[in-house]
Image (cartoon, grey):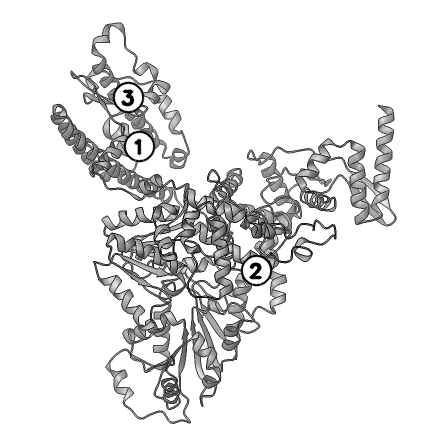
Amino acid sequence: MGAILGDDMGLGKTVQVISFLSAVLGRTGTREDIINFKKKQIPPDKDQHVFLIVSPASVLYNWLDELETWGHFRVGKYHGDPSLRDEVLTRAEQGRLDVVITTYETLRRNLNEMNSVRFEWSAVIVDECHKIKEKKAKITEAMGRLRVRRRVGLTGTILQNNLMEMWCVLNWANPGCLGDDKDFRVKFVKPIEEGQKMNSTKRQLAEARRKAKVLSNLRKKWFIRRTKKIIADQLPTKDEQVVFCKLSSFQQTCYQSVLESEDVQLVLHQNDPCDCNSGLKQRDCCYETNAEGESVKELMFSYLSVLLKVSNHVALLLPEMQGSKKALKRTQRVCDVVFKKHPHFVKLAREAAFRTLSDPKYCGKMQVLQQLLDVFNKQRRKVLVFSFYTKLLDIIEQYLMSTGEVYSRLDGTTRTSDRLRIVKDFNTNPNILLCLVSTTAGGLGLNFTGASVVILFEPTWNPANDQQAQDRAYRIGQRQDVRVYRLVTMGTIEENMYLRQVYKQQLSEIAVSDKTARRYFTGVAGRKDEQGEIFGISNMFALRMETSCLTRDLISRVDQIEGGLKVTKFVKPKETKRTEEESIWEEEEEEERKENEEQDEQEDERMEEDEEERRETDDEDQADKSHRKRHRADRDSSREDAQDRDPFSMHTLASQLLPEDDVDMATVDMATEQKTTPHSLSTSPASTDNDADTRNTTSASKRRSKVGAIHSRRKEAEKKTQFSRRRSGTSRKSFGEDISEFSSSESDSGPSQVKRRTGKLEVKVVKGKKPTPRRSVSSRRTVQRRKGKMTRTVSDVFRECGVAYTHRSDRVVGGSKAEAHMSHRAMEDVYELHQFSQQPANFAAEFQDSSEESDDLGPSASPHALKKKQRKAELDNSTTRTRPSRPPPAQHVCKINNKTVIVGGTPPATRRDHFAALAKSMGCSQEELADKVLQASTKSRLEMLHTFYRDRDSALGEVFQRLRHQEDIAEEKR
């Protein structure tokens, strides 16, 4: 028997294990433990507790350090010198050790020795147990044969690629707990993956959600998982952004050259019919190998690696000095293909070519990284840069040496004993601001809490690697907000790799986190007939030009679908009127606090800009200074008053209804003002000499009239105390229309300074002075940055480097209210109301009731009938349809032998499947078949259908004969 501790990375699984060991071994963590060590040894016949800890080699010394820090244990390291390993086992048999620590590989190689000890291990604690994910892997077999009483696994990512990996880990901890692997695949894997398709039917979605719930109930018996949300108030924030970078022109040329090569074309057309008319596929006939004798399968994996390197950094293609002759020859052939349009690189020696290609101008992501490091270096923030390729770390290292930066590095060549020292130096030394880390070597078990920025230079096929890497910094012990930047090359295989990560993470959200994950893709992994947008050779060997981002398109598609659903928000029934009011007061106070913070940031920014303007314009110095002081005092005093009053204060409502420029700086957007209230800026002939005074008075009148409308609104709300109606009542637009009806006298005029903005040119009008042209905020910031007066930000870097698109991962991965709503409706329709099972889950269809039951169900109606009627009313009254409703097609019922055939009532999903099958039988694509159908006559269409259905069932031939006969009669009548 065993269990899996699946807490999120950085939640202290190591410390929990040490606490468990202390409790079992009776340790107190005091001097008493040391005294007990000196007592007589445990007799061999007495029961003794010896625990075995198995961990990756990269964290072996981290475990030793943690055990020494948090308790008093007698620990032996079973790793390294064979003579020392034998001594550790001997001491364990004598009862002189509490814990033995080893690595996966050492255990696999010395399994017989560890099973031959005179005692049985009390428990084995396996760190990062997701390595036991393949049933036939040698390490899995070794861990299963270990003679031990209890099995405990530690992992933050139990599911990395597919659901079968979770089965393998749980089956190791508790053999047979989830049944046989084949049964698990049929019962859970297939229905969950089918339901996760974007175009799944309601039955598929309902079945997937039901199976996920059953799996969750089974899993919870042996698996516990807690996330960082439970200690969110104790941790800083983490902002994870995925940055889609563009290929450089050099990279794009090289990428296109690879796709146009003969080997890649051989891979892309391997499933096409051979041109020798043998009826076989090209890979099984005349095109089994290329000119060098390499099989199509070898070429496919080889050129996948080539495309990954080109999209990451072209310098990765340069051949290594070590390696087999065959590998060197292949690499040289690839370089000849890639650099055929740049022959000067081929002529250079390897070292010279490497130095030349290391220039950031040849790589789009390297340009972004260079600028980001410059920004964070000026901010004195510690940065971790992760990469899967050690050669890429060499490229970055060469750039850092040219700039004189102080950095550290940790990769697979770093000795295990030196890794902990490197981590400690980075966390404590203020002069080391950058650490280069290999994703595979440094992504497990290390604590880089000194870093506040994590940059992942490229994605990997396994999303757990990226999650493990970024959580080296974001974990318990971190005191700063953490920023994570994941660089992805847009339109290449890297974007395909990232989207596959999203697919796998969504499966993990369903199976591990019990969430209704959003459905982005139409394909299913491992199914050739359902490859969708990201699976299959054609999707991987493709280059989407810089004008298109597949990730953005897929997210927008789901957003549009969810935007067409009307999802209601659950409101807890009010116990008393007082309780409801207090909750709304709190919400309004929170909104006011957030708006005040935003105003502070924007005000500080405007104050800096005005300060720069004041230094350049001497004649406006006193006016600007007095205005800033007066506004700051007014704003501070109003905010202090607002804290003592209710949330419906004038300042709060004004900040909600007026643009921030109007509230804070008394500025007027002339373009908007002319559209909404043109009469407020018009002047009579008698006042043409006082344009500035009129504009000043008008601006102040507008503000005061708006405040008056807000004040009256507040009084009305206080009288009626209908807070919920107020929150969902008049919109900002309607308030703006009411405001224009109010007027004010000249005695209410505000400051004699108004800003008018038209386009990018601002004109500052001061009473009695000539207007002075001013640059727009963006143009002034550009000039100030050139002068070194303003610090560059990450957004500036993305804009300057031409980043195409960014998004936050937490807004993409996971579920949504709309998805939960669709899942709930699907389960209700399929399992309770028994209707619409073949409709698309995303389609809010009209209710079609074919039963003869009366609409007046009466008081004695069953709950099922009442719910069905309620569902009908909801669907009939819904105003948010994804497509207009259609009348049901005419149905014809035919009796053939003992079979009843209904023509015209086939569900839409089944019709789509039949249409795809018809296209396949005719040897054309669905688009080509659609063109043929549109151009064909009615008889031709019936003939196509006749042939198709007759081949599926001979009895259906009679149906089409009758239909053709009816068609002939109709034509004769016409």
Disc 2 marks which residue?
298
Residue type for callout 3: Lys
Counting from the top left corner in percent of width and height, residue 826 is at 60, 48
The image quadrant of residue 589 is top left
Neighbor class of circle 1 (other Cα within 10 Å; few <14, some 14-19, many 20+) is some
Label drawn at residue 653: 1
Specify whether 715 is left or right of 773: right
**Circle 1/circle 2 CB separation < 8 Å:** no
Q: Which of 261 and 701 is in front in this view?
A: 261
Neighbor class of circle 3 (other Cα within 10 Å; few <14, some 14-19, many 20+) is many
Depth check, mark 2 against mark 3: the one in front is 2
Residue type for callout 1: Leu
Specify whether 180 is left or right of 2: right
Residue type for callout 2: Glu
Quarter containing the C terminus: top right
Counting from the top left corner in percent of width and height, residue 355 is at 34, 53
The residue at the point 80 percent across, 48 percent down is 951
Q: Tell me how far mark 1 sits from mark 2, CA to CA.
A: 67 Å
Disc 3 marks which residue?
702
Specify whether 550 is left or right of 194: left
Q: Tell me how far mark 1 sits from mark 3, CA to CA.
A: 15 Å
Counting from the top left corner in percent of width and height, residue 531 is at 60, 50
Label drawn at residue 284: none
The residue at the point 22 percent across, 19 percent down is 696
Depth check, mark 1 against mark 2: the one in front is 2
The residue at the point 60 percent across, 35 percent down is 883
| N-term mark: 2 or 3 | 2
Name of the residue lying farthest toward the top: 685
The image quadrant of residue 25 is bottom left
Dot 2 falls on a residue whose secondary structure is helix
